Image (tube, grey):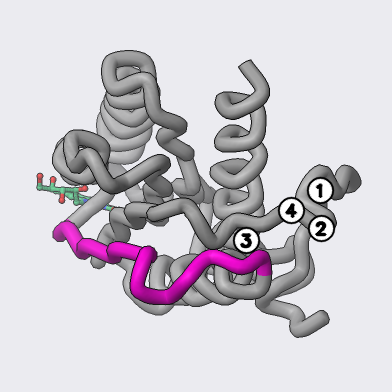
Amino acid sequence: MATHLKNLSSTDLLADKAFKKYSIGIAVADWNPEITHALMNGAVDFLIDKGVKEKNIHIKFVPGSFELPLAAKWLAERKDIDTVITLGCVIQGDTRHFDFICNACAHGVMNVGLESGKPVIFGVLTTNDQKQAEERSGGKHGNKGVEAAETALKMLLVKDAI
Ligand code: RBF
């Protein structure tokens, strides 16, 4: 498996499942784009590998991670979209912006899931530095975009089973 598809999750609930019926929204923050686009590529490759049709993957870009919850809400409001993946990268700086953006984003994404009843996945890296972000977007710690995509498919199975 290619490095950018590396997944640290130990379970494989997705073997032999057909996912071609699902439509998936992906909201991608354009801040730190070299990281977030690598997360996006990992997620898209994984979804296609699992049978999701390319035409059923709807990608929208927003300026930064703070904007992800609203984009996720707009995507979740679409009747044809079953689940939404949010992808971003917030890197610690010298000021307190990090905490505000991370907290707002995490709570906002969670709320969209609870309010829409659709799985809304938090695929946002919150790292101390650029190196940690690179290691988690196709480096030695895998690609968290892949893991976010896997979580989305797993949650769709859970929803279907309930
Ligand atoms: N957005 C991110 O996705 N990652 C960041 O690391 C990030 N750092 C920021 C640092 C500062 C000082 C500011 C003002 C914004 C930052 N943003 C970052 C953008 C933020 O998510 C949002 O797009 C803007 O605050 C506009 O609402």
Q: Which residue is mark 1?
A: 9
Q: Which residue is mark 3?
A: 146
Q: Amino acid at mark 2?
A: Asp
Front position among marks 4 and 1: 4
Q: Earlier in the sequence, mark 1 or mark 3?
A: 1
Q: Earlier in the sequence, mark 2 or mark 3?
A: 2
Measuring from the top left, give residue 100's x and y in whole percent: 27, 29
Does residue 118 lie above or below 8 as drawn?
Answer: above
Whether residue 35 sits left or right of residue 14 in the image: it is: left
Query: Can I make out residue 84 in this image?
Result: yes
Query: Can I make out residue 131 in this image?
Result: no
Q: Amino acid at mark 3?
A: Val
In this view, the residue in front, 113 or 118, is 118
Q: Which residue is mark 4?
A: 17
* Residue 16 - label: 2
Does residue 122 lie above or below 52 as drawn?
Answer: above
Q: Are marks 4 and 1 in contact (CB under 8 Å)?
A: no
Which residues are the magenta region? 50-63
